[in-house]
Image: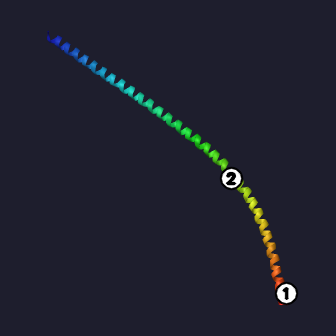
Amino acid sequence: MTASEDAHKAELQKERDEVSRLKAELKKAHTQKAEMEKAAAEEKKRQEDKSQKLKELLERAETSATSTQKELDMLNAKARTWMSELNKINSEMASKFLSFFILDRHKIYADMCLNSA
C-alpha cells in the first residue's frame, strides 16, 4: 500500500466516523424531540384536566350562589312579613297601653280628689 492509499483510507475512515457521529447526534435529537413532544402532550392533558376541574368548580359555585340567593330572598320576604306583623302588634299594644295609662291616670287623679275631700 502506498502512502496515498493509506491517506485515502484514513480520510475514508474519518468520513465514516463523522457519518457515525452525525447519525448518533440525529438519533439523540429524534429521541429528545420525542421526549419533548410526549412531555408537551402530558402537560397539555394536565392543563385540560385542570381547566375542566376549574370549570366544574365554577359551575358548582354558581349553582350554590344562585340557590343561596333564592334562600336569602325567601328569608327576607319572611322577615318583612314578620316585621309587618310585629309592627301591627306593637301598634296595638302601644294604643292599649296609652289608653290604659290615660285611664289609669284619670282614675288616680279621681281617687286623689275623692280622698282629699
What element does badge 1 sit on? Answer: helix
Write down the residue under mark 2: 75
- Corner quadrant of residue 98: bottom right
Q: Amino acid at mark 2?
A: Leu
Q: Earlier in the sequence, mark 2 or mark 1?
A: 2
Q: Is residue 117 above or below residue 84?
A: below
Q: Amino acid at mark 1?
A: Leu
Write down the residue under mark 1: 114
- Corner quadrant of residue 88: bottom right
Quadrant location of the N terminus in the rendered image: top left
Query: Which residue occupies the foreground of this view, 92 or 66?
Result: 92
Circle 2 packing at 10 Å, graded few (<14), some (14-19), many (20+), is few
17 left or right, relative to 98: left
- Corner quadrant of residue 81: bottom right
Q: Is residue 115 above or below residue 93?
A: below
Instruction: Name which residue lies at 36% across and 23% down.
Output: 30
> What's the distance in space between the residues labelled 2 and 1, CA to CA?
57 Å
